[in-house]
Image (spheres, rainbow, N blue to C red):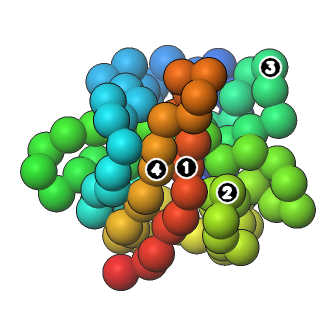
Amino acid sequence: MSRQEIITTKEGYINAPLGKYDFPPENGYFIGTLAYRAWHREKPCLICFFDTDNGEHFKLMAWWDKSYCPKNSDISFADNVMNGSRWKCEFERTKKGYMSWLTAEQL
């Protein structure tokens, strides 16, 4: 069921309000609800969209390694999670300026 919730079609991208989500502006963490997941159209990653408890809307990328998971986690966001689940996510900006998703802890 988990992969069936991932947005894969042009219609799915159009109907979901993905434009309101941004990468977090600085290092840290948030607590929030996984709202959407969508495959990146050109890169081997899964974009995860979260609604935070304080009303912000962030996206983080789960890159393919052994699965689509945060850098220091074994939780596959493609296979082992559901939209609507709650998470504490930690992230940091890399030396090249990209946001790196470090960990995810289900609450």
Q: Is the C-beta separation of discs 1 and 4 under 8 Å? A: yes
The span from disc 3 to disc 1 (Cα, nearest Å) is 19 Å
The kind of residue on which mark 1 rests is Trp
Of label 1 and label 2, which has the lower sequence position? 2
Q: In the drawing, does residue 105 fall left or right of residue 101?
A: left
Q: Residue at x 47, y 44 (%)?
A: 92
Disc on the earlier residue, 3 or 4: 3
Task: Return the disc, 1 or 4, that comes first in the chain's sequence.
Answer: 4
Query: Which disc number belongs to residue 42?
Result: 3
User: Which mark lies nearer to you, 3 or 1?
Assistant: 1
Label 3 vs label 2, nearer the camera: 2
Mark drawn on residue 101: 1
Which residue is labeled 2 in the image? 71
Residue 68 seen in the figure: yes
Q: Nearer the viewer, residue 15 or 56?
A: 56
Spatial CA span between label 1 and label 2: 6 Å
Label 4: few (<14), some (14–19) or many (≥20) C-alpha neighbours in 10 Å? many
Residue 66 image label: none
Q: Image height check: is 49 above or below 11?
A: below
Q: Residue 103: percent from the left, percent from the top?
A: 53, 64
Residues at discs 1 and 2 in contact (Cβ within 8 Å): yes
| Element type where label 3 sits in the image | loop
Query: Which residue is labeled 4 in the image?
Result: 91
